Amino acid sequence: MTEKNQEKQAFYFDIEIKKRELLSRLTLAALLAERGHHVFIGRYININSMKKIIPKATIVKKSVRFKNITDVNEIINSGFKIVNMEEEGVLVGSLNEYIGADMPPDAVKLSDRHLLWGDKQTDHLKNLYPELKDKFLNVGNPRLHLWKNRYFGFHDILTDDIKKEFGEFVLMPSNFAMYTNRRHVKEMFAITGFLEKSENIKIYEENFKIVEFLFKEFVKAAKEISLKGIKVVFRPHPSESISKIQEYFSGYENIIVRSDHDIAPWALASKAVIHNCCTTGLEAAFMKKNTIAYTPNSVSQYKLNEVDKIAKVALNVDELLEGIFSPAEFHPSRMNLDGYLIDKISLDDILNAIEGEQTKSFFDLSSVEISNNRYQFNKFCYTSARKLKDYFIFDKVKKQERHSIREKFPITSASELKDYLSCIYEYGLLKQPITCAPVGRNTFYIYCDNSNAD
């Protein structure tokens, strides 16, 4: 365990969506801990909560947007640094939409560094913000490393369990929240300031019509496939309502709506993954799963639709059925999405980029560590109070929005993180055993477990 009150470089990885971001960021956190740094990982917390844990750190954020500019400024003014490791920027409608929603001027200047998915985004940002060009680094995203290695076998047991429970099935991930959760998504766009321009309102309305069409076509296709005797698992996006999606499939026993666990074990357990401009399709292709882009009437959700061309493409249900039962096909020359994805990444390059923003701080684990019993008691009190508050909310839409927000990062125990850390140590990615200890709700300190070293 770390020496008491030792000054080291300090890093905090914050997470918005656990199922999407936790394992890749935990991988980097463990490797930085192995390099001898103070490392934390957990939910987004404000500066007051952060200071209760550590006086200063470099915060590796998912993004800096209009909605959190005030909080980020407070963090920076308190001596913290910000590294933006982009999670949204690999599949974009257009570079202008990407800038408008994800990299607006008032937000982009706040981060000390931006770690980007590909060359195209990096070059465009450098041209757009030449005075900030040194901030934009095209080092790729660690999620790609996990996809290529099938998560180092971490999901193998769960994958087998899913196969035993459901047998043979196809997976259809839904990424149509713009239609299925329209009020929430529109509010998010409004917060970014994207909808303040008339031309962007037109883009939003056009995209909405496309997403509405695709969702309805996916629902129709799922029903037709199920009537052929093929089981379908239809998986809502974290921002979508499971109960609302289930209503579309009432009476179809061969269609299962599930969103539990990460999506990776579902993809690995499936016979085929059917998507449209979805990151899950990209993930499935890199995991060498049978991947089919369903583009009815040749419609893709994004104009930049290279992700729909990296494997099979189906224009109708007959072609979908043919694709499900034929061998997987991939097009290696398209896997870099025409420069929007660095498909040969180096974890060391990403770690070095993060380490480049140095913030040293003292930290004493014993002063903030929470025992397992106390952590479970706090969890019980927190979830009980939350359920009581929900009971008195009668607006169904508001209640669903609260549920969607909570589902992004449900209460997590240290044992979940330890299981993955043990997995990547046994795999050989780590040279030393790494463990963790809770220091707040969904917030953990990552450190070398020298007591278990050989």
Image (cartoon, rainbow, N blue to C red):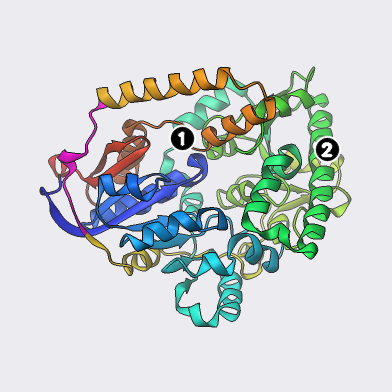
Circle 2/circle 1 CB separation < 8 Å? no
Camera-nearest label, 2 or 1 = 2
Q: Quadrant of residue 323?
A: top right
Observer able to see residue 184: yes
| Left or right relative to 436: residue 225 | right
Q: Hey, what amino acid is under mark 2?
A: Lys
Which residues fall within the magenta stretch?
361-372
Rendered location of residue 262, percent (x, y): 52, 37
Q: Nearer the viewer, residue 238 or 441?
A: 441
Precedes in sequence: disc 2 or disc 1: 1
Observer able to see residue 429: no
**Which residue is under mark 1?**
156
Q: Is residue 64 above or below residue 389?
A: below
SS assignment at label 1: helix
Q: Nearer the viewer, residue 272 or 184?
A: 184
Q: Nearer the viewer, residue 436 or 426?
A: 436
Q: Is residue 335 magenta?
A: no
| Left or right relative to 52: residue 188 | right
**Which residue is under mark 2?**
216
Give me the C-alpha separation between circle 2 and circle 1: 33 Å
- What residue is at 17 percent from the left and 40 percent from the top? 367
Q: Hey, what amino acid is under mark 1?
A: Asp
| Left or right relative to 200: residue 7 | left
Rendered location of residue 298, percent (x, y): 85, 54
Q: Local crowd at mark 1 within 10 Å, few (<14), some, or many (≥20)?
A: some
> Could you tell me which quadrant the N terminus lies in?
top left
- What residue is at 45 percent from the left and 30 percent from the top? 157
